[in-house]
Amino acid sequence: MLVDLNHESGFIYGGAPADSAATRINGLIDAALVTERVSQPPRDYLGASRIGEPCARRLAFEYTRTPPDQGREFDGHMLRIFKAGHVFEALSIRWLRAAGFDLRTERKDGGQFGFSAAGGRLRGHIDGVIIGGPDIGVAWPALWEHKALNAKSWTDLVKRGLEVSKPIYFAQVQLYMAYLDVAVTLFTALNKDTQELFHEIAPFDPVKAQALSDKAVSILRAADAGELPPRIAAACDFYLCRLCPFAKRCWERTP
């Protein structure tokens, strides 16, 4: 006697109902990720990973922990993308070490390598440092920074290079090198769609690093004075403003 396995169970094999188990499961996962993020202490410093953001006012909102506009918070989907980036980074670490690179990602006490300046109000945490390895035309040590990108973004990076294609990442590594006194960074990008790897050697540029440091100081001083830096645009329909999670509160304020 065969058991009837086609009774109502909330599942449709070979199809997906509007209110499917998959939808409910994803909703639960996303809610858990959002809850996890909310439970974490908010960042109380200006991060080197963000200093390349072109709008100083947006950075000031972030530094002062200003809530984003309603509905513009990170959702579960975006948090899943962040989490997946860590997994891809772990793969690249394993592959580089297997290729003979002495890549260190933690201090002896288990903490991250990084720097702190301006009384702890400007900080950065690097993905790693390569102490030695095969001859690739780099004098070790070198900082190591990793990003996992979708195919379109990865292809643009390969075509145009780090500084032009990814100015925020370029600024990030320049500030790292300035405060950690290292002359070069090996920037690794993994194509999430094809697992192709791209590596770029980024040398330290002291002039650009100083400009970034000065930018950070000006944002911190504005925050201390209870002021906001100027807007990046003259109208709210500027493309960066349309993408900004603080656009509504920014343009509702007097300049």
Image (spheres, rainbow, N blue to C red):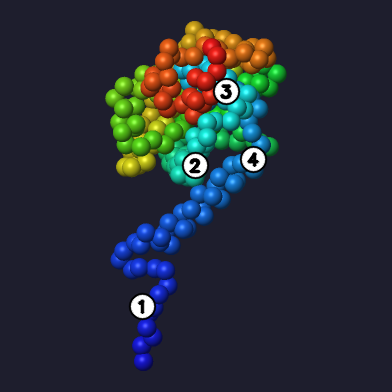
Which residue is denoted by mark 1 in the rendering? 6
**3D distance between C-alphas at marks 1 and 3:** 55 Å
Q: Is residue 194 left or right of residue 36?
A: left
Give neighbour class at mark 1: few <14, some 14-19, many 20+ (Cα, 10 Å): few
- 3 or 4: mark nearer the eye: 3
Q: Quadrant of the C terminus?
A: top right
Q: Secondary structure at mark 3?
A: helix
Which residue is denoted by mark 2 in the rendering? 75
> As rendered, which of 79 and 47 lies closer to the eye?
79
**3D distance between C-alphas at marks 1 and 4:** 44 Å
> As rendered, which of 219 and 99 lies closer to the eye?
219
Give neighbour class at mark 3: few <14, some 14-19, many 20+ (Cα, 10 Å): many
Which residue is denoted by mark 4 in the rendering? 40
Q: Secondary structure at mark 1?
A: loop
First reached walking from the N terminus: tag 1 or tag 4: 1
Which residue is denoted by mark 3 in the rendering? 61
> As rendered, which of 66 and 14 lies closer to the eye?
66
**3D distance between C-alphas at marks 2 and 1:** 36 Å
Please say if the residues under marks 2 and 1 sit with CB atoms less than 8 Å apart: no
First reached walking from the N terminus: tag 3 or tag 4: 4
Q: Quadrant of residue 243?
A: top left
**3D distance between C-alphas at marks 3 and 4:** 19 Å
Q: Quadrant of residue 2?
A: bottom left
Q: Can residue 48 be spotted in the picture?
A: no
Task: Count how many numbered circles sit on residues in the image.
Answer: 4
Give the amino acid at mark 3: Phe
Q: Secondary structure at mark 4?
A: loop
Q: Which mark is residue 232?
A: none
Give neighbour class at mark 2: few <14, some 14-19, many 20+ (Cα, 10 Å): some
